Image (tube, helix red, strand yellow):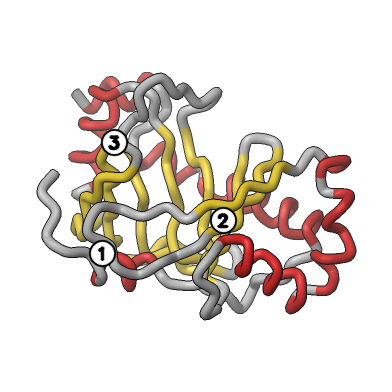
């Protein structure tokens, strides 16, 4: 079963070997956005897998690296959160959690690999739009670049994802660029997990 992951470059050791290169692209995107998040918590890193069976194998393989702390149903499929036994270290950040979504029906990603990271930017905002406006107020360099992001090939998406049973709103602003994505939200993933009621996957 593990051979399937190796053949697709999705074995944990293969992905860990690509981590620094992925984080380097994240830093390039941060520079384009005019954001300095070196002192912010890089909450978690997310993997994208298109095949249901591969996702199941990857799920089991990553359990050797940490403990599953959540299996929330979001948009009709489980999203697994694994708390690493030892946080991953890359550049300025220690990454405590892995997010592993099972494939969404009818959605295919162009590449199966690391896909996004999420940073915690503390806020009391309850909606994605309010959070976005607060970000621009607190980060003048981002506000100054905002109207030109599309010219740089950067897509912006506002959302308020919420799993069944979660009681804490966590509005999100996402920036996508050249196959990588940065998401900003007010609350750490572990705090969101703690807000969940009992959910059976």
Q: Nearer the viewer, residue 41 or 10?
A: 41
Q: Which residue is mark 1?
A: 85
Q: Nearer the viewer, residue 53 or 139?
A: 139
**Dot 3 or dot 2, earlier in sequence:** 3
Residue at image location 70% in from the left, 36% down from the top: 178
- Where residue 78 appears, as percent x and y from the top left, is 25, 41
Asked if the residue under mark 3 is in contact with the one under mark 1, i.e. CB atoms within 8 Å, the reply is no
Q: Nearer the viewer, mark 3 or mark 2?
A: 3
Q: Quadrant of residue 96?
A: bottom left
Determine the secondary structure under disc 1: strand
Q: CA distance from mark 3 to mark 2?
A: 21 Å
Marking on residue 183? 2
Q: Quadrant of the N terminus?
A: top left
Determine the secondary structure under disc 2: strand
Q: Quadrant of residue 135?
A: bottom right
- Against 6, residue 32 (above or below) is below
Q: Nearer the viewer, mark 1 or mark 3?
A: 3
Looking at the rendered structure, the number of numbered marks drawn on it comes to 3
Asked if the residue under mark 2 is in contact with the one under mark 3, i.e. CB atoms within 8 Å, the reply is no
Check disc 2: other Cα within 10 Å, few if <14, some if 14-19, many if 20+: many
Q: Is residue 91 left or right of residue 12?
A: right
- Against 94, residue 106 (above or below) is above
**Dot 1 or dot 2, earlier in sequence:** 1
Q: Quadrant of the C terminus?
A: top left
Check disc 1: other Cα within 10 Å, few if <14, some if 14-19, many if 20+: few
Residue at image location 27% in from the left, 24% down from the top: 52
Residue at image location 89% in from the left, 64% down from the top: 144
Q: CA distance from mark 1 to mark 3?
A: 29 Å
Residue at image location 57% in from the left, 61% down from the top: 128
Marking on residue 122? none
- Where residue 150 appears, as percent x and y from the top left, is 82, 42
Q: Which residue is mark 3?
A: 76
């Amino acid at each position: 079963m593990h051979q399937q992951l190796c053949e697709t470059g999705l074995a944990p050791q293969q992905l860990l070997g690509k981590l620094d290169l992925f984080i380097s692209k994240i830093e390039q995107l941060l520079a384009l956005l005019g954001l300095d998040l070196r002192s912010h918590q890089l909450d978690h890193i997310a993997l994208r897998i298109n095949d249901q069976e591969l996702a199941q194998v990857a799920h089991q393989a990553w359990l050797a690296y940490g403990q599953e702390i959540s299996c929330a149903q979001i948009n009709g499929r489980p999203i697994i959160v694994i708390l690493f036994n030892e946080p991953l270290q890359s550049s300025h950040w220690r990454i405590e959690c892995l997010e592993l979504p099972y494939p969404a029906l009818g959605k295919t990603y162009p590449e199966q690999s690391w896909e996004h990271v999420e940073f915690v930017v503390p806020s009391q905002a309850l909606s994605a739009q309010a959070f976005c406006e607060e970000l621009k107020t607190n980060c003048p360099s981002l506000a100054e670049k905002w109207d030109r992001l599309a010219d740089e090939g950067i897509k912006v998406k506002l959302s308020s994802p919420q799993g069944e049973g979660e009681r804490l709103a966590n509005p999100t602003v996402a920036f996508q660029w050249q196959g990588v994505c940065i998401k900003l939200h007010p609350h750490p993933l572990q705090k969101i997990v703690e807000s969940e009621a009992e959910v059976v996957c």
